[in-house]
Amino acid sequence: MNVTEAVQSRRSVRAFTDQPVDRETLTRVLEKAQRSPSGGNVQPWNAVILTGEPMQALFDRVAPQFSKGRAGLKPEYDLYPKDLDGIYEERRFGAGEDMYASLGITREDKAKRLMWFANNFRAFGAPVLMLVHTPKYMGPPQWSDIGMWLQTIMLLLREEGLDSCAQEAWAFYSPQIREVVDIPDDHIFFCGMAIGYRDPDAPVNQFAVKRAALDESVRWRGFE
């Protein structure tokens, strides 16, 4: 698989098979991903990778929070800007509506939407969950570095025939994560990433994910 194929076939997979992922494969991916760029070669990324009983223990700890609704959400940062609006909010809203449409869940069916949202915290059935954290004093440039590292991992996973879903939603339950997983007190929890093999028959893995036209994001100067 070349880079273009990896980019074009990567998507946020939200239904995985139960096929296990071996540590050797993950080690190979992560060792290659250490070549990801970072400002000043700081390499600010840190992660804990769970499978089996430790992963289930986390799921069990987070599950009781669902019934608390918004009162049970304690993220350590804003997942989206509070004043997100315009085309950026339209894209976010549109992606969610397209996903729920693929599942046959209407906008009015709040209960089913909430039940589906809870699948985030079972890693959508993936056999592996990676939890990412970084020192609290790291700033936006280092968070950008972590994003490049995560993208590198996602593309290398495609090369191995694997799929992923980067899950900032895990940040909603960072206090519970810290009870189960050893994350240093002076680190901020960033996100999770579900890793495994996609279920090709699941409708949620088949809907078209829209992307903006290039001229919405890029301006050219000095070219013929």
Image (cartoon, rainbow, N blue to C red):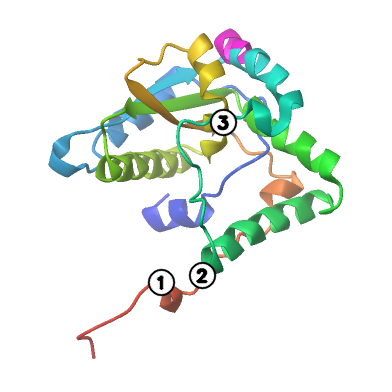
| Left or right of residue 14: residue 82 | left
| Residue at figure coordinates x 67%, y 13% from the top left | 60
Query: Looking at the rendered structure, which numbered label has been put on residue 172?
Result: 3
Place of residue 165 in the rendered image (x, y in percent of width and height, measured from the top left):
55, 39
| Residue at figure coordinates x 23%, y 38% from the top left | 35
The crowding category of the residue bearing disc 1, from other C-alpha atoms within 10 Å (few below 14, some 14 to 19, many at least 20), is few
Which of pointers 2 and 3 indicates the residue nearer the eye? 3
Work out whether residue 156 or residue 78 is closer to the camera in this orientation and state it: 78
Residue type at mark 1 is Ser
Sequence order check: which comes first, mark 1 or mark 2?
2
Work out whether residue 101 or residue 173 is closer to the camera in this orientation and state it: 173
| Left or right of residue 1: residue 14 | right
For the residue labelled by badge 2, is the local secondary structure a helix, a strand or a loop?
loop
- Position of the C terminus, as image quadrant, is bottom left
Query: Looking at the rendered structure, which numbered label has been put on residue 212?
Result: 2
Sequence order check: which comes first, mark 1 or mark 3?
3
For the residue labelled by badge 1, is the local secondary structure a helix, a strand or a loop?
loop
| Residue at figure coordinates x 45%, y 51% from the top left | 6
Q: Which residue appears farthest toward the left when viewing the image? A: 40
For the residue labelled by badge 3, is the local secondary structure a helix, a strand or a loop?
helix
Evaluate if marks 1 and 3 touch, with contact meaning CB atoms under 8 Å apart.
Answer: no
Evaluate if marks 1 and 2 touch, with contact meaning CB atoms under 8 Å apart.
Answer: yes
Magenta span dominant secondary structure: helix
Q: Which residues are magenta?
A: 52-57
How far, Cα to Cα, is label 1 from label 2?
Answer: 8 Å
Query: Looking at the rendered structure, which numbered label has been put on residue 217?
Result: 1
Place of residue 174 in the rendered image (x, y in percent of width and height, measured from the top left):
51, 23
Place of residue 186 in the rendered image (x, y in percent of width and height, measured from the top left):
32, 19
Inspect the magenta stretch and tell me whether residue 53 lies in it.
yes
Q: Is residue 127 above or below residue 117?
A: above
How far, Cα to Cα, is label 2 from label 3?
Answer: 28 Å
